[in-house]
Image (cartoon, rainbow, N blue to C red):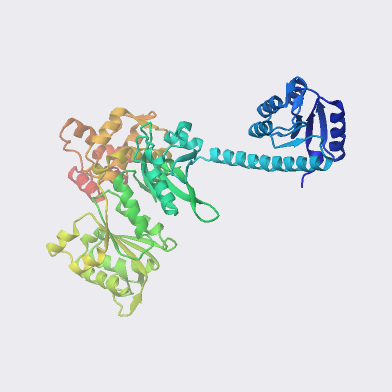
Amino acid sequence: MIQPQNFRILLVDDEEGIRFTIGCLLKQEGYQVDTAASHIDAIAHFQSCHYDLCLVDISLGASNGIDVLRDIKTVSPSTQVIMFTGHPEISTAAEAVRLGAFDYITKPVQPRALKSVCQLALNEKQLTDERERYRANLDAIFNSISDSIIMIDANGCLAQFNATAAASCGYTDELIGREAAGIEFGCEGLCRTALLETLRSSTPREVRRFECHRPDGTLCIVSFKSTPITASDGTATGAVAVIRDETPLVELEHSLMRRGQFHGIIGISEQMQRVYSLIEALADVPTTVLIHGESGTGKELVAAALHHAGDRAKGPFVKVNCSALSESLLESELFGHVRGAFTGAVADKVGRFQKAHRGTLFLDEIGDITPAVQMRLLRVLQESEFERVGESKSTKVDVRVVAASHQNLAELVKQGRFRQDLYFRLNVVKIELPALRERREDIGLLCDHFLDAFNRKFSKNVHALSDEAVRLLRTYSWPGNVRELQHAIEHAVILCKGDTVTRQHLPQELTDAATGAAPPAARCSGTLTLEEALVIANGNKARAARLMGVSRQTVYRHLKGDGRE
């Protein structure tokens, strides 16, 4: 029901009596009413005020009411217009309706008929205004959506598109009404084909992440979803498609997949991304894992990542270097012993397996264990129990074993130096670590990491490497892998007095390799001469050995040979 006080009416008639009579009648109903005596006067009113309804006499003296109607619809298309006349003519009535008049009534105007037609006209205006607001809201939503939207009608012709579709695909107003199948943007047309299939089958379609070649030549990754538009009887009257550009999301996912650091492991190369994925896949399963890689590739870091990334992270992470202990000591370390089990066993000892209960045991250099230890280890892996040295009672444990070796265990099996059944038990899943020379794109990232670490350690402020230093680091073969690079950066940070590492700060092995010079005889197998390492380490032999990447025994052996031990 309309509220008359909310509507304004303009009455246009050249007879003052009619203006007064009809004006009073409408005001009594509650309408806001203005009057005009001529064509010019009527248009002047519209320039200063908006009218919901206009009553216009066909005959305005020298003017024609039809001209007034035409001008009103030009100035204010939403205004409803009712024409009235004392001399009705069919042709005039038809012309008025054609130009947008709501109705055509005759004089003398009956009050009841006037009230009724005014209410009908204003009801129609309310509905029209509501539809227009709804359409405007839809258009605003339609064009504010960042996805491309395309609509086709029941005949498969383009009916509408939004601004995003215009910008992304190249749709223009000239294409409205054209068959969608015949529109060509230089792409494969998968979107339009799927949209037409939705119209034909009256079923939604969805295509996830496919390549889209845009008119400007750019390649995007988009997802497509279409839905049929149906009438109340279920027949398809069209179809609409939403096309989402997922290129930024895909790029972000790829960026996240190419992680530069994972649980302390540094590397952005494809090889390291595969290692990260394997670690994630294996982290929560109890499967035994064998890690293979050259010395210095980070096998212990991978073992730690397997532990800390999984559900055993709250348990202990226990490490054993199998190559550093003799057979008897290794058995004691792994399984423990009871007092008196052998000479020197003055008290009970808890072994590493027992310490690693509900956690992870990392067996480094597993290829160096003796056949006797191999047999005992196999039993623990098969039965999850063991006996301490000198004890007959078995102890049950829940331990996930991660083993590592720089040796080819399969080759050791062929040579009879490693049990085949133990090899199969250890080699359930293998993680192959690439050598540093196989992932040179990681060298810069590793250098930045080590620079930060050694700046903090030595209270230095070394920020960068010179171009020449970077070139040397990237072309060197790195037989000692990441460990050797770490020592090289430590050496450089110690010697560097400024904020940039240059060629002269790098270990001589690197510069010799670049020039093809033979290494000096006084060198050990690491990256420093013994004299340099001892000076840098202030005489600490263990520290000098770490700087050189060799064992302490090697340093002691060289010192004895020089008569300094």
Please give the name of the residue rendered at 29% of the width and 72% of the height, measured from the top-left corner. 380
Report the label total: 0
Query: Residue at horizontal 17%, vertical 35%?
Result: 520
Q: Is residue 389 above or below residue 171?
A: below
Residue 246: percent from left, percent from top: 43, 43
Q: Quadrant of residue 186?
A: top left
Q: Nearer the viewer, residue 245 or 185?
A: 185
Q: Is residue 356 above or below residue 449?
A: below
Q: Quadrant of residue 57?
A: top right
Residue 453 seen anywhere in this rendered image of the structure: no
Q: Position of residue 87 (x, y in %)?
A: 76, 31
- Front position in the image: 209 or 258: 209
- Point 76% across, 41% down: residue: 117
Q: Percent x, y for residue 131?
A: 64, 42
Question: Do we see residue 488 in this rendering?
Answer: yes
Asked whether, in this view, residue 195 is left or right of residue 106, the answer is left
Q: Nearer the viewer, residue 132 or 212?
A: 132
Question: As displayed, is residue 150 above or below residue 375?
Answer: above
Picture quadrant of residue 455: top left
Position of 410 with respect to 69 (left or right) is: left
